[in-house]
Amino acid sequence: MLNTRTLAVVLAAFLATLSSLPAGAAEDAALLKDLSAVIALLGQPCGQVVSATRLKADDHVATCSNGSRYHVFINAAGKVVAEKR
């Protein structure tokens, strides 16, 4: 059985984790919206990006609502590229 002190520590850790979730979700939503815009501006069919996996800074794999997947990154020349996968 947990004593009061242990319960307080576990509860505090849970609340700290829970309070950080909305900020992460907001950042994810902004990233998905940005990736959707980039893919559309580059003339690729996508609809809306529904998920993204970060490979490294400025380098993502985006999955679109139409089923397409794109590798979105900045190339050596400094241009944004969306390569179909």
Image (cartoon, grey):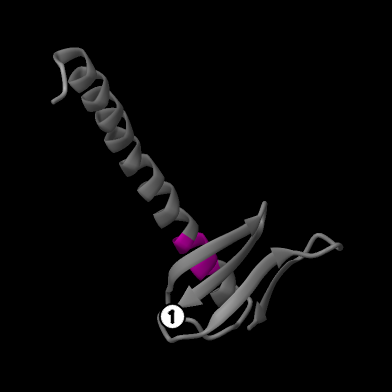
Question: How many circles with numbers are drawn on the protein?
Answer: 1
What span is colored magenta in the figure?
32-37
Q: Is residue 35 left or right of residue 84?
A: left
In the foreground, 34 or 73: 73
Question: Residue 13, relative to residue 18: is it above or below?
Answer: above
Residue at 43 percent of width and 54 percent of height: 28
Magenta: predominant secondary structure element? helix
Q: Is residue 3 left or right of residue 38?
A: left
Residue at 69 percent of width and 64 percent of height: 73
Q: Position of residue 17 (x, y in %)?
A: 32, 34
Residue at 40 percent of width and 45 percent of height: 24
Which residue lies most toward the front here? 1
In the foreground, 21 or 84: 21
Which residue lies most toward the top here? 5
Q: Position of residue 66 (x, y in %)?
A: 43, 86
Question: Residue 53, relative to residue 20: is it above or below?
Answer: below
In the foreground, 4 or 54: 4
Q: Considering the image in quadrants, where does the C terminus appear?
A: bottom right
Q: Considering the image in quadrants, where does the N terminus appear?
A: top left
Q: Position of residue 4 (x, y in %)?
A: 14, 15
Question: Residue 19, relative to residue 62: is it above or below?
Answer: above
Residue at 30 percent of width and 27 percent of height: 13
Q: Position of residue 56 (x, y in %)?
A: 67, 54
- Is residue 57 magenta-colored? no
Quadrant in the rendering for residue 69? bottom right
- Residue located beneath label 1 in the image: 47
> Element under label 1?
loop
Quadrant in the rendering for residue 30? bottom left
